[in-house]
Amino acid sequence: MSAALPRHWPIRSFPVIDDCVQIGGMPLTRLAARVGQTPFYAYDRRLLDERVARVRRTLPAAIDLHYAVKANPMPALVQHLAQRVDGLDVASLGELRIALDTGMEPARISFAGPGKRPVELAAALASGIVINLESVGELETVARLGREQGLRPRVAVRVNPDFELKASGMKMGGGPKPFGIDAEQTPALLRRIGELGLDFQGFHVFCGSQNLRAAALVEAHDRTFELALRLAVDAPEPVRLLNIGGGFGIPYFPGDAPLDLSPIAANLERWLPLMKERLPEARIVLELGRYLVGEAGIYVAEVVDRKISRGQVFLITNGGLHHHLAASGNFGQVIRKNYPVVVGNRVVGTEREIVTVVGLLCTPLDILAERMELAKAEVGDLIVVFQSGAYGLTASPTAFLGHPPCVEVLV
């Protein structure tokens, strides 16, 4: 790899040979020809396997690893990961179908999310998966559907904790939330589960996402275990499942540092003997999405025009925010920051310049890179947005302005 390469995270994951990004063991230009169109997303099997192996190697062996399908529900990718993790977590009927197609044991699949429709709950019940209850009304609907189907629903309680995950990108617990049952309301719900005779599995506590601070995650795990032990006193059956959520982040922007797993692993190791003593039947589940897939994917768009407006160079691509809303900064960023971006077929180049890379949509929000130094690019060159393996295509407004769909490949 050339010493002149800019130092940012993606270049460490994807080799660069002859000034061209390599993915899946081949040059980007060859992959583009094989895909047969741009734009496209590509996900690298090797990087997926390496990330799962790193988590397995670092965290205690007693921790079950689940993949949160919402991070990237591409069927081939989910199938690939299903052979390497202990369970899958879904958030819709569509994701449930993808998960069941992998052959994963239904008892190892869970369904979370507010506002589950009766048809989704009925399908989940018939499938034999674990339903994470998010409200009193959902509990009563599940019980009614169980009676109608002659089945005993497998349920867990998603708890909205009385604490937050500090420094998380999105806070999913603590305070008033649409997610889960408030911790103070959970004992009454547990008693109702017992009255209805449902198959109680345990608890799901998810505080927040995209966290790069190990200390914050350690504190959240401490408080999650303490909460679970308190709530278990009112459980109608022994706790067999404790999903402590995820929240592990990946670096995107200048100044970001990768998450250090070592303190998290040490803290989990410290808790496991006590949890084994107090909740002897419980499987402790860590549910990861972005952390497993985010750094394994790239988004590739082709330069279709190059123009200068009042001294500023614009590279116009055939992609944009309708395929990659997050990279445009419109998926939760308060202040827009650039994802790592390169000209994939001339990473360093012979000449460099400050450019703004935009999509082809009629909105000023359609920006992939703003005033960023890149190799000088021409029409036909390939723009690569790294860190694109999670919350990419399916988190984007793909129907906006009616442009052709984007494809995804696993290589």
Image (tube, rainbow, N blue to C red):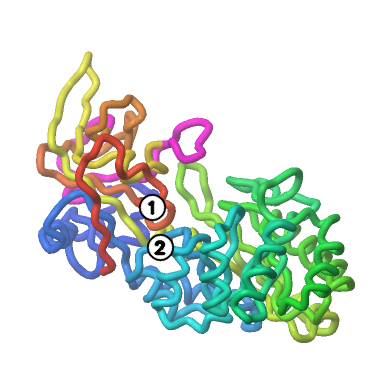
The quadrant in which residue 114 appears is: bottom right
Are dots 2 and 1 in contact, CB under 8 Å? yes
Q: Main secondary structure of the magenta part?
A: loop
Task: Inspect the image, locate mark 2, and give the three-letter code of the amino acid beneath it.
Answer: Pro
Q: Residue at x 38, y 41 (%)?
A: 325
**Residue at 68% of width from left, 72% of height from top?**
155
> Image quadrant for the C terminus?
bottom left
Q: Nearer the viewer, residue 56 or 186?
A: 186
Could you say where residue 281 lies in the image, as x and y percent from the top left? 75, 85
Frontmost residue, 175 versus 299: 175
Residue at disc 1, secondary structure: helix
Q: CA distance from mark 2 to mark 1?
A: 8 Å
Q: Which of the image's four quarters has the N terminus?
A: bottom left
Q: Residues within 10 Å of mark 2 (few under 14, many from 20)?
A: many
- For marks 2 and 1, the one nearer the N-term is 2
Instruction: Name the foreground residue: 318 vs 143.
Output: 143
What segment is highlighted magenta in the picture? Answer: 329-356
What residue did someone put label 1 on? 394
Residue tagged by mark 2? 73
